[in-house]
Image: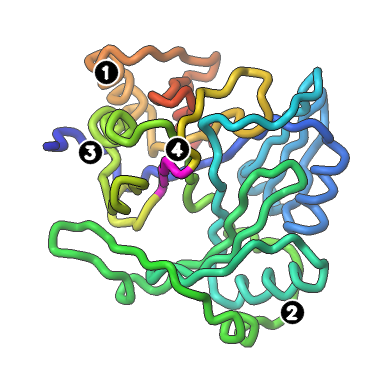
Amino acid sequence: MTQLYQIDSQTHPGRISLNINNLAEMVEFYQTIIGLSLVREEDGKAYFNTGNNSPILLVLNKLDIPSERKATTGLFHVAYLLPTRKDLGNTLASLIRKEAPLQGASNHGYSEAIYLADPEGNGIEIYRDRPIYEWDIKEDGTIKGITEAMDADGVLSSRDDSTDKFPKQTTIGHVHLSVAELNKTQDFYATILGLTLKDTYGSQAKFFAAGTYHHHIGTNTWGGVIEPPKDNDLGLNYFTIVVPSTSDIAELTNRLETEQTSFTTDHDGRLIVKDPNGITLKIETEEQF
């Protein structure tokens, strides 16, 4: 596939919204266990950032009618990117002290990551990037990842125990999605949105990014045959992609129209579109984020 359009290299994930059942339990988890800061809670929604007027990274949306978790396309995990290995050490030590439900810890070559899930089964990755000179960047620009055991002792020894909160500079580094089919997914994220295919894991997973990053969007079919989510299903409500300016929004609007991809806009001009798996994403500017 020849990629004719590339999105601005400064494009990145913004925030994620989850449909949930138990707002009180989930607010407690993300505040006390994970270390995000609750900005406000209103109308059945809770908004989190990393404090000090930083951008909203997480929105919890309480469903009006409780729902059972279903196997659908949607979130595999959301990945919070910490600035340094020291921060990852602080977070890992904090999660161990709090007896958080850790699921694993991996060295991916370009990053070190720890994994867990929230009380309603939404996957969470918390990671730090290795220096870019340690990444396995191929001549064609693809970036190969690995999955090995993380040096947990090394990560823990880097900590200073200064805080159990995420540092202000924390962002959502990537969003990893469970999808139904990879080729149509690639056509959407690469051909239409203009992200670059960075790595392929056999016939099971593909990873996309803007610029030189290892991946901003991960996709996999490990869930097998799964249907798109409905509006009142638990799990991913939407996630956002942030572009530098309104000119990028205009260019993407033209792309969607040219490719005959349905979309809407909200009252602030954000683009709202569903990918081929029925997953909702919103595209906004840095100013809107």
> Mark 2 or 1 closer to N-term?
2
Chain part drawn in magenta = 216-222
> Mark 3 or 4 closer to N-term?
3
Whole-number angstrom distance, CA of label 2 to CA of label 1:
49 Å
> In the rendering, at what x and y percent does residue 60 appear?
72, 35
> In the rendering, at what x and y percent does residue 27 appear?
81, 44
> In the rendering, at what x and y percent does residue 167 appear?
65, 63
| Amino acid, disc 2 | Asp
Residue at mark 4: 242
The answer to whether marks 3 and 4 mark residues whose Cβ atoms lie closer than 8 Å is: no
SS at mark 4? strand
Q: Residue furthest front?
A: 225
Q: Does the stretch in magenta take in 80?
A: no
> In the rendering, at what x and y percent does residue 153 appear?
61, 85
Residue at mark 3: 6
The answer to whether marks 4 and 1 mark residues whose Cβ atoms lie closer than 8 Å is: no
Whole-number angstrom distance, CA of label 4 to CA of label 1:
17 Å
